[in-house]
Each structure stands twice: as structure tokens, then as C-alpha cells.
Image: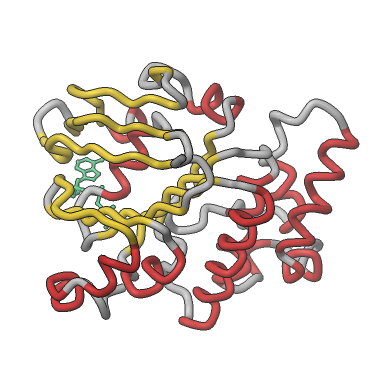
Amino acid sequence: GSPPIVLNVNGIEVIYNHVILVLKGVSLQVPEGGIVALLGGNGAGKTTTLRAVSNLLKGERGEVTKGSIELRGERIENLSPAELVRRGVVQVMEGRHCFAHLTIEENLLTGAYTRASKSEVAAGLEKVYAYFPRLKTRRGSQAAYTSGGEQQMCAIGRALMANPSMVLLDEPSMGLAPQIVEEVFEIVKDLNAKERVTFLLAEQNTNMALKYANYGYIMESGRIVMDGPAAELANNEDVKEFYLGMG
Ligand code: ATP
């Protein structure tokens, strides 16, 4: 049969600053072991959707005012981001968010706070370095002096240090050269295949995202306007006309 649904977002509304209605009833499902892409242009609501799931809206003066979010059948709207990390859900924020003054390895270690023992942390590091050999080479470099691609890899690596079952990845392609974007997505594909990490990724780069995702949702002005298997979306005439070539 089909894999169980890990994440079920059901008709959520999000309001910023008590007045700005940004998500107008968003529903989506992420199956166990899937790579699901959330697509759409600037300001469509992709980041807000990810923030709603990982409960990171508060700092932005946003709140979920309608609908529900379930992780494996359990409501999670009231769980703190830290509790969500303990339950295996980790967000990689847009813009890479490495600590510029820390080395790559120190950055990775900041992601390990849910790990119980030193040996677990060491094993986590080795695993990250196995997937991101570039990070191993650059482990002693201050993040500020590494490339955009390396910083994006570092941000994903840091998320992996928490041993997540699901990663919310916000705009991994942002600001990266096409070849590096491909390199990042190849690693996502590997992590998905070998570590069974489930991904929900927000992307403006529709081309690349549909190449790697199994399923896609397209957002416009706070609503899902289309969804389907990635291959179908990639061949859809409207998608081709309005979204391919973006990003
Ligand atoms: P981007 O790729 O630019 O991040 P997005 O699809 O992720 O686009 P969001 O960042 O979710 O879109 O933004 C959706 C809408 O919410 C936009 O109109 C944006 O201006 C608005 N918005 C985002 N954050 C806030 C905030 N903290 N306060 C008020 N409005 C916000």
C-alpha cells in the first residue's frame, strides 16, 4: 500500500501582526519517506507554511488561527520548536543561517543538542561528513569564509546532527550557482534514499525541485492552487508556462 502520512497540514490560516491574513486555508500531506516540494513565487506563503509546521511563527508575530497540523496523527501546533526537534522535525531556514564566526564543525555541533552522548555526537559528525565531504575538508574554517554552497550544506548538516526523520528545507537553491544547487539536491536525494529522511522543501526553482521531488504543491497568494506527482506537474502546460524557468 501507500506509505503512511507523516505530516498532515489541514486547512491552516496564518495571520501576521493580528491583521495580515497570509495563509488562507492551506492543506498538504507529506508521506513517510517522501520528498515533497512546495512551489510558488516570492511571497506566495511557502516560508510561512514551513514556519507554521515547525512553530517558528511567534518570533515573526504570526499565528495559526484556523486548521490543524498533525505529525503522525498527533496535533503539534502547540509544541515548541525544541520539542519538535526531539520528535524528529527540523527546519533549515532560508538564507542558510550559519553562525558566521564559528567554524563549520562548531556550527554542526550546535545542531547536536538533542544527542545524549559524546559518541552519538561523534557518529553524527562522521555521518554528516560522509554525505558532505566538502564540509569535512572545510571543518576548521570559519563559516564566514566558506562559499554559499558550503554554508547551505552546513545548514543542512547541522539539521542532520539532530538525527531528524523529517527536514523542512526552505529555499535550498537560494543564491547558489546551478551546479551547486544540483550538488545540494543530489545529497538530499541520497539522504532520502539511504537514511529515509522525509523532506518538505520550499523552492522557487521549480525545475530543480520537480526533478528531485516525488510530489509537488504550487502556492499562490496563500493558497495551494495545484498539486500532483512531480512528473505530472513538470509536464503540465500551465506549470511550464508560469513556473518553469523561475528561481
Ligand atoms: P519567499 O520566497 O519570498 O520567502 P514565500 O512564498 O516563502 O516567499 P512568505 O515568506 O511566506 O512567502 O510570505 C508570504 C506573505 O507574508 C508575503 O506577502 C509576506 O510579505 C508576508 N509576510 C511574511 N512574513 C511576515 C511578517 N513577519 N509580518 C508580516 N507579513 C509577513
The residue at the point 65 percent across, 46 percent down is 160
- In this view, the residue in front, 154 or 30, is 30
Residue 213 image position (x, y, % from top left): 42, 61
The residue at the point 46 percent across, 45 percent down is 168
The residue at the point 59 percent across, 46 percent down is 197
Residue 238 image position (x, y, % from top left): 12, 71
Q: Is residue 76 above or below residue 162?
A: above
Quadrant location of the C terminus in the rendered image: bottom left
Residue 94 image position (x, y, % from top left): 42, 54
Q: Is residue 72 above or below residue 237?
A: above
Q: In the visual, does 33 lie left or right of 206?
A: right
Colour mapping used in the image: secondary structure
Asked which quadrant contains residue 128, the reply is bottom right
Tag count:
0
Q: Is residue 228 above or below residue 19?
A: below
Q: In the visual, does 41 lie left or right of 165?
A: left
Residue 66 image position (x, y, % from top left): 18, 23
- In this view, the residue in front, 19 or 112, is 112
Q: Is residue 236 above or below residue 106?
A: below
Q: Residue furthest right?
A: 119
The residue at the point 41 percent across, 53 percent down is 201
Q: In the visual, does 204 lie left or right of 194?
A: left
